[in-house]
Image (spheres, rainbow, N blue to C red):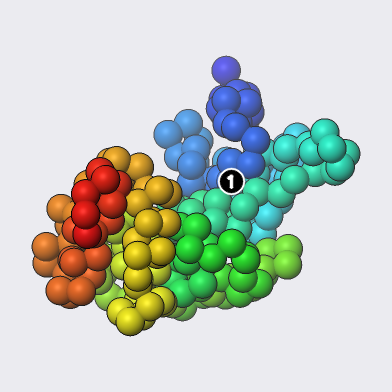
């Protein structure tokens, strides 16, 4: 099997909407060869391009009869993997990711261990803002996202409704990880973690 065939076969196993870069095939081909193979697949129409170097498996909407693009978050994750950056949505993007705000913002801001970057993807302006590694390495992806969302709300705006929404939208594993990792965080964030865990298990807050 050639490198190009191995890449094409792996892409076939990806679900629709999955974003990827040449770096995701480093175990089967060099970066340049993988990039060339992806470029050829794109030219043939087998995959779609989101931004430079980032592609995705297109999904067709049966209702609209049009192609559904990969989510902006998928594109950001692909960029982060390729560059070995740690990223987490911030501000309105974090609120939307956790169901605290149903309106998708036109500008998506992420905190990142990498340099400052801006991307234009479809209707979205994506901005990666650098944060020190220590601010991102000490917690899991979900905890970083929850912390960013709580900061966006502000301490005075985190009430029973917000706690309840987070309790419903987080999985048992995610809520547990946040509770465990919150011990070294700001006291009001740690208290929110306890309330979320309690709400998820039907305990009085």
| Percent position of residue 161, x then y | 41, 64
Residue shown at the point (40%, 48%) measured from the top left: 168
The outermost residue toward the left is 183
* Nearer to the camera, 20 or 140: 140
* Nearer to the camera, 117 or 100: 100
- Residue 131 in view, yes or no: yes
**Left of 116 or right of it: where is 157?**
left
* Nearer to the camera, 135 or 52: 135
Residue shown at the point (59%, 62%) measured from the top left: 102
* Nearer to the camera, 143 or 131: 143
Residue shown at the point (24%, 65%) measured from the top left: 192
| Percent position of residue 21, x then y | 55, 48
**Left of 112 or right of it: where is 122?**
right
**Regarding mark 1 in the picture, which secondary structure is present there?**
strand
Residue at the disc numbered 1: 19
Quadrant the N terminus occupies? top right
The outermost residue toward the front is 204
| Percent position of residue 31, x then y | 51, 46
Q: Kindly indicate the quadrant of the structure image that contains residue 112.
A: bottom left
């Amino acid at each position: 099997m050639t490198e190009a065939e191995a890449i094409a076969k792996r892409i076939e196993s990806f679900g629709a909407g999955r974003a990827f870069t040449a770096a995701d095939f480093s175990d089967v081909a060099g970066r340049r060869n993988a990039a060339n193979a992806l470029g050829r697949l794109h030219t043939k129409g087998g995959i779609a391009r989101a931004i430079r170097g980032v592609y995705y498996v297109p999904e067709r909407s049966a209702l609209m009869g049009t192609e559904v693009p990969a989510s902006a978050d998928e594109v950001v994750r692909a960029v982060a993997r390729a560059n070995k950056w740690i990223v987490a949505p911030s501000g309105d993007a974090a609120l939307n990711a956790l169901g605290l705000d149903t309106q998708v913002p036109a500008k998506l801001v992420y905190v990142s261990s990498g340099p400052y970057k801006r991307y234009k993807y479809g209707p979205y302006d994506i901005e990666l803002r650098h944060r020190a590694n220590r601010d991102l390495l000490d917690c899991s992806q979900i905890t970083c996202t929850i912390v960013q969302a709580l900061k966006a709300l502000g301490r005075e705006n985190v009430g029973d409704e917000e706690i309840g929404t987070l309790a419903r939208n987080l999985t048992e594993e995610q809520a547990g990880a946040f509770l465990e990792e919150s011990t070294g965080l700001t006291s009001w964030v740690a208290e929110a973690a306890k309330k979320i865990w309690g709400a998820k298990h039907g305990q009085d807050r």
